[in-house]
Amino acid sequence: MSRHALVITGGPVPRNLGTLPAADMAIAADMGFDNARDLGIHVDLLVGDLDSASPGAAHQAQAVERHPVDKDETDLELALAAALNAGMESVTVIGTIGGRVDHALGNLLVVAADRWADLRIHLRIDGTRAWVVRDRVEVHGTVDDLVSLLAVGGQATGVTTTGLAWPLSNGVLEPGAGLGLSNRLAGPTATVEVGTGVVIVLMPAATGL
């Protein structure tokens, strides 16, 4: 059975998360420790430079992996690396679009990096669900729920969808292009397949999740 981790990021406390998936461990990225506590999530490992976590967080955490403030990796990158080192095969990254815009956008780019190709990454961004897709994902919702597909880091080819109002068959998605935005579920289930490249599939919170 696939080993799964929750990775909790910093910033304002995420809202409208709903029920989170079961996990084998929870990893907090710096201030994510405080967010995890507010969300009622027990943290197994605190990772980061601890420049934003509350005083005493390092003493309250079950285990701590502390890094220098002057580093070349973000706390989220360190947390994802810790998940890989712990033998996790998939993660759910819990975050928010609130707070600093550079952090929010940076986190979306981080999770799509080739470095994490061995991790299946699902995101809960406030009430929005998202998936980093390199091969295939199946998503569930209700008819007319919004679904957006974003190519990240370069062109995505061989993009084929089922269960969407406007399907793609062996399509090409370019970064920064509108094709793929604001599609809708035509039924309770949709699939997205990617031949080459990386696509982030998002189901925004406004869909009533």
Image (cartoon, grey):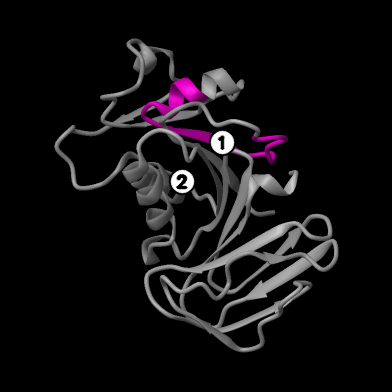
Nearer to the camera, 6 or 175:
175
CA neighbours of label 2 inside 10 A, class few (<14), some (14 to 19), many (20+): many
Q: Residue drawn 26% across and 30% down? A: 49
Q: Name the residue under label 2.
A: 83
**Is residue 125 positioned above or below 170 on the image?**
above
Q: Mark 1 sits on what residue?
A: 25
Q: Which residue type carries mark 2?
A: Ala
Up the image or down, 19 lies above or below 117; here it is above
* Residue at image point 63% right, 50% down: 204
Relative image position of residue 88 (x, y in whole percent): 53, 50
Name the residue located 52 percent from the left edge and 25 percent from the top edge: 36
Residue 133 spot, x, y in % from top left: 56, 67
Q: Position of residue 158 (x, y in %)?
A: 57, 86
Instruction: Give the image quarter of residue 42.
Output: top right
Image coordinates for residue 203, horizontal then vertical, percent: 65, 55
Left or right side of 92 for 185:
right
Quarter placement of the N terminus:
bottom right
Q: Is mark 1 on a helix, strand or loop?
A: strand
- Is the residue marked by circle 1 packed among few (<14), some (14-19), or many (20+) residues within 10 Å? some
Q: Is residue 68 above or below residue 39?
A: below
Q: Give the range drawn in magenta.
A: 17-35
Amino acid type, label 1: Met
Image marks 1 and 2: residues in contact by CB distance under 8 Å: yes
